[in-house]
Amino acid sequence: MTDHWTARSEPLLDAEERVSGRKLYVDDLRLPDTLVARFLRSPNAHARIVSIDVSRALATPGVKSVITGLDAPRRYGVLPVGHDETALAVDKVRYAGQEVACVAAETEEIAEDALRKIVIQYELLTAHLSAHSAMAATHHLVHDDKPGNIEKEYHHSFGDSVRGLAEADVVVADTFYHPRVSQAATEPHGTLARFDGADHWTIWTSTQTPRHVQRGVALALDVPAESIRVIPCAVGGGFGGKSETFPQDVSAALLSRITGAPVRIRLSREEVFTLHRGRPENYVRMRLGLRRDGKVTAVECEVIQDGGAFCGYGVATILYSGALLGAIYDIDNIRYDGYRVLTNKPACGPMRGHGTIATRHAFEALLDQAAVALDLDPLDVRRANLLKPNSRTVNDLRVTSYGYPECLERVAEASSWKARRGRMPRGRGLGMAGSHYVSGAANSIVRGSSPHSTVVIEIDPSGRVTLLTGAAEIGQGSDTVLALVAARRLGLEASAIRVISGDTALTPPDLGSYSSRVTFMTGNAALEAATRLAARLKQAAGKRLGLPPDALVLAGGAVRSAPGGPMLLAFQDAVRMAAGGEGQLIEKGSYLPPGEAQGGRFPGSGVGPGVAYSYSAQVVEVQVNEETGEVRVERVWAAHDCGKALNPQAVMGQVEGSVWMGLGQALSEELHYSPQGLLLNGGLLEYRIPGAVESPPVEVFIVESHDPEGPFGAKEAGEGSVAAVIPALTNAIHDAIGVWITELPITPERVLAAIQRQGHGSGAKPALPRPRRRENASARP
Amino acid sequence: MQKEALRLRVNGSLREALVPHHRSLLDFLRDDLELTGTKRGCDDGSCGACTVLLDGCSRLSCITLAHGVPGRSVTTIEGAGQPGRLSDLQLAFISEGGLQCGFCTPGMVLAAGALLQRIPHPSEEQVREGLSNNSCRCTGYGRIVQAVRRAAGAPEETP
Amino acid sequence: MIGLPSFRLHRPTSIEEAVGLLAEHRDDAKLLAGGTDLLVNLRHGLATPSHIVSLAEVPGLDRIDCSPEHGLTIGALSTLESLATHPGVEESFPVVVRAARTISGPTLRAMGTVGGNLCLDTRCHWYNQSFFWRQACGFCLKKDGTACHVAPGSSLCWAAYSGDLAPAFLVLGAEIKLLSVRGERRVPLDRFFLDDGLRKFDMASDELLTQVCVSATRAHLRGVYSKLRIRGALDYPLAGVAAAARIAGGGTFHEAALALTAVGPRPFLVEGATEILEGLRANDEDAIERVAHLARRLSNPMNTTWAMQPAYRRLRVGLFARDALREMGERGP
């Protein structure tokens, strides 16, 4: 059987349902006699809870139950090292907006009314609202067991960066600041929970990671995970913001057990912003050494992340920031110091491009700064630092397929880079940058040797195929790509395959839809299951036809001797023969990352290794008004190495969306907090995601490097293109007007300030926080 | 709480319900009529997910009172085309890849339909301005704009 | 709050009935036109009326009459979209159409009304927040509290007027009609707006804005409206400058006027601009710079939004004013 993949764009399997409003999101579900619940939230960023009196709330007609922290005091968290959350605050509140109590009532109006009757006495504590102040704090720590409010710090040194910098012909250094940004998925989070009796729950929720929710709710309620059935509904966008257990999941489940009725919680848009789990503030100091020919000799990087009040995915975030300094360029010497800081703001999360955005901005900007210093073309500097396919980086990341060189060439050609960069009228500029991302993390959050993905495919006697997967379809097209993979193996159309995804009670284990793992990992599991089925079908057909199975192919809904050949046996006949007395054909496939992809053996080595990496190169064309400081992105060319485009239109859609989301962060998105820690812009009018008018055309080029381990050679497409667009834009601004923008978002005021700084010589950029080095904290591989 | 009988033509049929004065059109559609294709995204008119048509014009139902549009005819996505009888516009959204998560899509489709009523053959710029009350977090808008222009008969773009 | 607080909705079917209801309920009533401002504010608890008077069934308030001979009269319930797409108004009073087109997007413009845009509540990031949020920060002078967070100690509210139409009407010398059971009065628009985010308008709680009128003598002035915002649509202005002038045959400025919005609690005419420019050549860069400087000096944006600093907003007022005057001098309309 050939593994040749004929690319044909397939609309999402459920596109008709989505375009006609029939797709059911969690807030669309209706169960009889459902109660609704609302949260009481802390007005204080940091305070001890002295007392809570819910008696008047409980006495309100229509109120069925009121719960507080002590009703579910067990800690949970998505990482085993970060079990520091409770559904409702216990003892103290750690950020303004934190959930303190939850009221279940007949209507939201009654619940809201009851919330106002809850009396809480707080004793205010010092609120640490910035990384600067949090790291300097000695008392009123966010968590008592985290001195200096450091959640985690890592000090990695690979090769010898000191020697590398000494050998450099030019050393460039700069500081970078990225504020908090939010996923701002269009669908607000929500949960519907029903206690089914006998310690069983069903939870419908808006999640990318049904199994993480299952585990988290079970932990919080102190019940076995098997007690919890999580059914992810259609998800209206995730981008990393729906990959954890949330207070609404635990609270609705608990309230349902108490009241005996289904309980629904829907968050307002303000509450979605309060929940956050978006990107942390990033402070980056970076130093880069290059030889005269453009070869990088060393990079030293310090990252401080203000991750908010809880760990969440934070340890992974700070590790990604360092680890993915590798795996895009060939660098012998890397030093990384990463600090994840706790502050009294909402916890951050694994937003699209998890952990890589700020360091990639810094690195790609410094490459261009060095190119200017060395009088080299930035394209040539990147060409001088390429990796080789099938290599290992100095920080022990295994690179397999590597389409980055072709990505660079494609966008350079499309943008007429050589002819136009540096040659356009002042104010107009071109900038280039690259980025990459894991195509699935090689190490699971949950330690163990279980497969990361398992897929079951069933074929009933009539020939109907059902694919069961634990991965959640969140609009990224994962159901469709899995159907495509299985259909290709079974010689069917993707639309002939029914995909049941996410339901933890019906589907086999899968880690879920994050870290860009589904196409690669779940795709491989689907491929294995389908391959087993195909073998059984050909075996049975061969027996009937008196032909060796190897002489048969499954194609065009039939058994044939060759893909275009005449039908020898109808698909369903082959199914009936293969199933025999069982009546039904069932096979499973699974995926476990290979050991050699799982990285080195040093503290923190678990995060960063991917089973493969996607690559992106981008060129941005920009127009800058030097008088007003306004920046207009005219056009973006983006080339993305996805290994193999199983569904080209979906790949292009993911890349366009990634580039666009990166541009939003670059130009207009940021979260602002008041001096007492209240989010100033928790709404879509003031949190400015770009609209249709100012969004530029993005031209996408698919680069196919045919990954040796990906299903049909495929890798991820949904995250690797987020990071590059930011440095490509700042580099373009330099090409246009000669200034480096190192802080986001790129507001007109920042552009004018940069122009002014340049006019006055030296820099007066805002100071970055200084970590206190703890000598024995260093860990060397 | 002041409740009053509300009669409204929705997707061609006359619907009646006893509805409080302060109920939004969005809540009326979703909760009273269980027409959940109209989505709630922002609560303040800033995302467009709740867009419906009122006598053919787009309208943000989250900042419209159910009792505030007497005598008008409401069209929701349920009335705009369902599987098996999708509109050209919906088919173009599918074929051009103009949707991913689909949460903004019902509102986007209706707003685009209203736009094409006003301007049957819009330029790219007119489509972008015409959809500026509808936010999409997945696509970056390019394919949505393309879908609307294709539905309006514009030739396929060759990059 | 996701739902709306409860209230009693009145749906008068005549203008007399509407003003009667306002007279009856006064401060306990709010007028509902397009709802794009009011319904958001209701959810936030910024307005807490027991009575809402909907104008949806009041006939005759949505006419736009425009002619070079009789001038322009716009019923207060005319939608922003009907104004933005009105060919006659575009021809004769271009600055109005230009301003209308910058408001939000087409769906919101088809809901929002001219009267509602003129009477837009002033905005501030300490004010346009949920009840929870405002309670958490101790409320503010404008609503439920006593202290101004923008200008501590101030007895005036600095929330910024954020309508786009007002400056366009101001440069045309518009008047408005206010109706109540006590009768009708005409107020020059530049006296309607008060320099305090608390009181906002010279309008009693029983009055209804029914009409905006522009004299025929102001027809065919050239006009420009420029708006500072972060996105290409949707956003309220962070600063806005409207300009109008007649450019005589010899290329000289006549009846030139500038007005500013979103840089203080009220929109206002740039006093002295008309006098400086009258009769000067439209390419008199020195005069243009003087007026731009004046506009910049008179603007007084405060930290009512985290989105942009006052200094930058003032800078842009000056640049907008300069560019508007240049544009009017160079070409029509």
Image: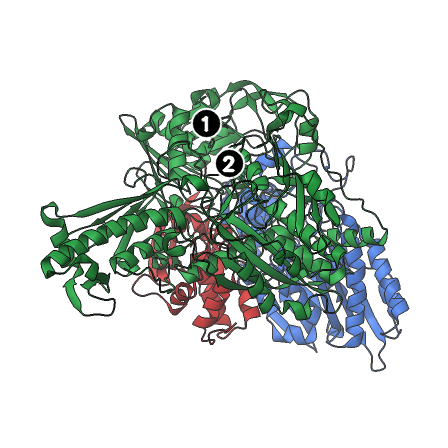
Chain colours: A green, B red, C blue
Which numbered dot is residue A600?
2
| Furthest residue toward top | A50
Residue placed most toward the observer, A629 or A163: A163
Between circles 1 and 2, the one closer to the viewer is 2
Q: Secondary structure at mark 2?
A: loop
Q: Position of residue B87 (x, y in %)?
A: 37, 67
Q: Is residue A607 left or right of residue A511?
A: right
Q: In this rendering, is residue A304 above or below C104?
A: above
Q: Position of residue A326 (x, y in %)?
A: 57, 45
Residue placed most toward the observer, C307 or C93: C307
Residue placed most toward the observer, B50 or A721: A721
- The subunit carrying tag 2 is A
User: Tag 1: residue type?
Assistant: Tyr
Regarding residue A243, the answer to whether it shows in the image is: yes
Residue at numbered disc 1: A76
Q: Is residue A99 left or right of residue C201?
A: left
Q: Position of residue A282 (x, y in %)?
A: 64, 40
Q: Is residue A740 left or right of residue A273?
A: right
Q: Is residue C236 left or right of residue C283?
A: left
- The subunit carrying tag 1 is A
Q: Answer with mark 1 or mark 2, whichever residue precedes in sequence.
A: 1
